[in-house]
Image: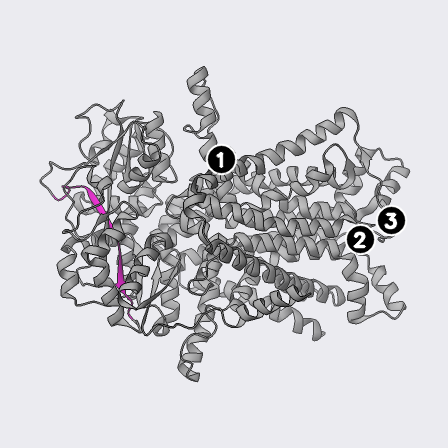
Amino acid sequence: MRLTPWLIVLPIALVTLIPVAVVVSSLADPDQEIWQHLWQFVLPELLVNTFWLVLGVGLGVTLLGVSLAWLTAACDYPGRRFFSWALLLPLALPAYVTAFVWLGLFDFTGPLPTWLRETWGFRAIPEVRSRGGVILVMSLALYPYVYLTARAAFQGQGRRLMEASQSLGLTRAQAFWRVALPMARPGIMAGLLLAIMETLADFGTVSVFNYNTFTTAIYKAWFSLFSLPAASQLASILIFFVFVVALLEYQLRAQRSYATSTRAAAAPTRIVLRGWRGWLAAGWSLKVFALAFILPMTQIALWSRNVFATDFDARYLEFAWHSLLLSGLGALLVGGLALALGYAQRLHPSGGLRLTARLATLGYAVPGAVLAVGIFIPIAWLDNQFIDRLGASSQILGGTLAVMLLAYAARFLAVSYGPVDSGLARISRSVDEAAQSLGVVGAKRLWRVHLPMLRVSLLTAAALTFVDIMKELPITLMTRPFGWDTLAVRVFEMTSEGEWERAALPALAIVLVGLLPVIFLLRHTKNDPALAC
Amino acid sequence: MKSMRHVALAVLASLLAVQAPASFAEEVVVYSARNEQLIKPLFDAYTQETGVAVKFVTDKEGPLMARLKAEGKNTPADLFMTVDAGNLWQAANEGLLQPVKSKILQANIPDHLHDPDNEWFGLSVRARTIVYNKNTVKSGELSTYEDLASPKWKDRLCLRTSKKVYNQSLVAMMMWEHGEAKTEDILKGWVSNLATAPFPDDTKAMEAVAAGQCDVTVVNTYYYGRLMEKKPNLPLGIFWPNQTLKNKAAGVHVNVSGAGVTKHAKNPQGAIKLLEWLSSAKAQNLYADVNLEYPANAQVQPDKVVTAWGSFKHNLINVSEAGKLQAKATMLMDRVGYK
């Protein structure tokens, strides 16, 4: 066993593994009465609900994400340039805010059903507070994960792949289904896995629909039955489930190679969609963009206008700066850790490292507030040691930015690791060998050979992490210093008292600030000769 | 490049010292599950009046309690502030609070609104009452919470989700008054009377009543106040139930927001002073009116808007009983399929 890669991988993994271990350690002390109750009256329904939700959202985000990624990465049609970045925007909207807007618009009391009812006497509108409704809204909120990672994968293929396939006699459609799509699988799966983990850990969105899932049981055990241990035990089951899924995915993938030859391919020739095909593609892109972004944004903007005069003040500058600072540093740190994790494995492939890296990404599947406690307990323990044994006058770690950033790493490593890992999988090993034969090794090889090839993947990872930290709540609430609020915290203050209209203003600010990484991502991937979009 | 350096410096500075050193002689540290916009005006007023700084951090009650527990005797928090008696009871039950001896608090806060062991005190009263559609509900149709289970309300009732603590407390009080078996029958009646699936919040439930999806619902009064302020033309009326009863179930179900001094407070005297000030006449108006709640101090008049809804008889059972039975109430609601 080589020691060096472990020196890198293990400390990174511990950032996640310690909080996860705190959560899982609850398994030692099961609460009979609560478990019996949950098992008998709560879990049967929730497991069925969760199954359908994960299946539905999984299919939904794949359909939306892959189709739009293919269209914007490999084809040309009216509005493509605009849609290629605009379709990322829903990412900046907290999903529960989108959900609340949808409920307001399409529930019985919403403007559209009311109009249909009162003008036409039409009552047979599908109920939005339903399984179908929650699946639709979550798919619209989460598809950008798949869109972004799939798009990076399609772009990485260059034009050679399609050309080669077609020269072997495949039609264009066949080439897509049998070559381009399967080759993009690591990217698609990376995004899909993120969307599924987010779905499993979500509490806010399903609460708006009052759609009970496994996470509902976790919070019920904690907040209503007053048993944090029972909540942690349920969360442990979730962690185990996601770990198994992640392993299965890796097993499937390990049987094949996904590397495409080089970046030598010139700017890809796009498949030009002419006539009705082009308009069909534009219509599909517009429809998704309108439902996932324009619709909720319009409502948020209208609400913001109503409260702007009373609620907007100088403090918003401070909130925005805090959000930017946390998200920016967090994206750098988490992206860097993910790269280290992925690169250590590339240099020294081994099952043990692979497993450890997978474990390190499990934080994303834990409901946020439960993970926040798992993070806080060891921090508080350390602080107590400093105070009791070393005579510190007050907490040293608690309420520092450094701890906040590490806490974000524990939660969001998966978000960065997914794109980086699938990006590395696309780089052929022969590249490494060629570099080595030219005497380019070690850090120099990473800097001069791999990093340029990983650029799109790294930017994707950083952008996703940036936006996710921007929206993050439970960890921010638990670890922030006194009087140090962010835009997301403002959203929380308002929504937790049911003041959705006033929450619109900070939500709008999140979208505006969250636009920055999207624009950045776009500018830095546009002119890349091999990966141009 | 110069601006880059400024940004880098700012980043470095915030990494090292995010907490500005306090320039006040004395400070009280508060962990609060009551939102920033509701408490900050009060703390600002307190600081202005006394020169004592109030440092606070907000979060949900569950995480705050977990935080207090993890920090143990080194917690910086002096005062724990939250909504709902269930949460206050739980904090005391977990040993996170300490009993407070204060003549001022005893005089200002009625007995049924504070912990019998004085570990926490209610600071505002939240009444959970019935709101109905004036066009479809005839006068005399409404009487009690229990009556909403009767068949005449079939397909006419809207409810908020059972996951909200306000409903858990309401049901817990019903269990205390009627016992588990009878409460189960009432809940079954409620569930079978539902016109549509439970709503995520009180406002949505009232909007459904106003739109005619159902005729009646149960909400906290301040949500009614807020909604009517925005849309004064909604055909919604407020009804005080259980007013003519003579038994334990008499009176409108009330809950509190409140606070208690933490067990390991560094400045317990300062925390008690702040609590006493919050219960005083001038602070009570500021505390309750900002959210259209009722002052806990009985000598203080509520806001004009609130007074206009009429006066009513409270249920006088100590609110801590709701905390004791909250878990059982939640389980009962699960059993009858109230989602």
Mark 2 lies on a secondary structure that is loop
Mark 1 lies on a secondary structure that is helix
**Camera-side residue: B296 or A163?**
B296
Q: Amino acid at mark 2?
A: Ala
Circle 3 residues within 10 Å: few <14, some 14–19, many ≥20: some
Badge 2 vs badge 3, beta-carbon distance below 8 Å? no
The residue located at (40%, 81%) in the rendering is A388
The stretch in magenta equals B248-263
Q: Vertically, is B138 above or below A159?
A: above
Asked whether, in this view, residue A123 is left or right of residue A255, the answer is left
| Mark number, residue A102 | 1
Q: Is residue B120 visible?
A: no
Position of the N terminus of chain A by quadrant: bottom right
Same subunit, labels 1 and 2: the answer reads: yes
Looking at the picture, how far across and down is residue B131, in whole percent?
A: 26, 33
| Mark number, residue B37 | none
Q: Amino acid at mark 3?
A: Ala
Position of the C terminus of chain A by quadrant: top right
| Mark 2 or mark 3: whose residue is earlier in sequence | 2
Badge 1 vs badge 3, beta-carbon distance below 8 Å? no
Circle 2 residues within 10 Å: few <14, some 14–19, many ≥20: some
Within the image, what quadrant is residue A356 found in? bottom right
Q: Vertically, is B122 above or below A124?
A: below
Q: Chain of mark 3?
A: A
| Mark 1 or mark 3: whose residue is earlier in sequence | 1
**Residue ID for mark 2:** A259
Q: Chain of mark 1?
A: A
**Residue ID for mark 3:** A265
